[in-house]
Image (cartoon, helix red, strand yellow):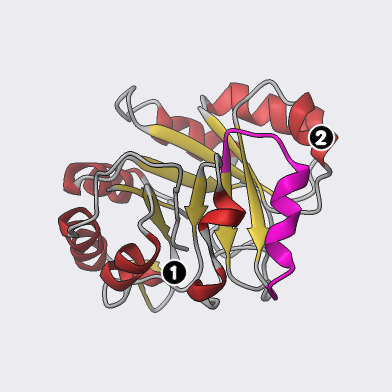
Amino acid sequence: MKVKICGITDLTTALAAIDYGADAIGFVFAESKRRISVEKAKDIVAHLPKDILKVGVFVNEGKEKIEEIASSVGLTHVQLHGDEPPAFTKALSFPVIKAISIHDDQSLKRIEDYSCEYFLIDGPKGKYRGGNGLAFDWNCISAHHMKNKKVILAGGLHEENVEKAIRLINPYMVDVSSGVETEGKKDLDKIQSFINKAKGSQTGGTTNEFIYTAE
């Protein structure tokens, strides 16, 4: 089972997460309490192993700006959390993770309109487009919706429910942000526990078309 830790703002936390087994690190460049500067993200990425995915989160940002930040920081993937149309995702030169917020059974139909490397299935929009810690009804996810799609599950995951989510959905990857925080700050103990439980789940490590992320 692969794990992405999102909303990283300092090198110590990034390196600790990787040491605990994280496969991907996320940096937020959109409006958020976890927003990071380009310079700081660039410095962190310079110290990370090459095989770790470095993901930048953007919301309704212009193509030129995304490309500029991604190139400068050294990102491997771009995560779009806004209202970006299908044509926009195709125009980017970086691999795209398109986030889809689940509000009802019809929300997943949006996936059919896009063609990108990964889809991030997230909870309902809150104050910010992502990282709100809001879960959704996992039972609305079916193989029919996700056929031949690589999906990342996000929204409301934490150390107490990640194993259940993995058993129910059988994802490829889980991604967490607020679920490993204490009083708004990343908690290394929670990060380690989350990763251990995710990677220790019986269905973890399987290669299938599902990639679910937790935020």
Give left or right: position of 38 versus 65: left
Which amino acid is tagged 2? Phe
Question: Residue 88 — which label?
Answer: 2
Q: Is residue 35 visible?
A: no
Where is residue 110? Give x, y as percent. Answer: 75, 54
Residue 100 visible to the viewer:
yes
Specify the quadrant of the image occupied by residue 194.
bottom left
**Residue 45 horizontal/vertical position (percent):** 42, 31
* Residue 206, position as x, y percentages in the image: 27, 44
Q: Is residue 164 left or right of residue 202?
A: right
* Looking at the image, residue 33 lies above or below residue 143: below
Q: Residue at x 81, y 53 (%)?
A: 83
Q: Which residues are magenta?
A: 103-118
Tell me what residue is drawn at x 20 percent, y 53 percent: 199
**Eyeballing the image, is 186 above or below 113?**
below
Residue identified by numbered label 1: 178
In the image, residue 21 above or below residue 127: above
Q: Residue at x 61, y 28 (%)?
A: 70
The front one of 87 and 51 is 87
Rendered position, 193 above or below 174: below
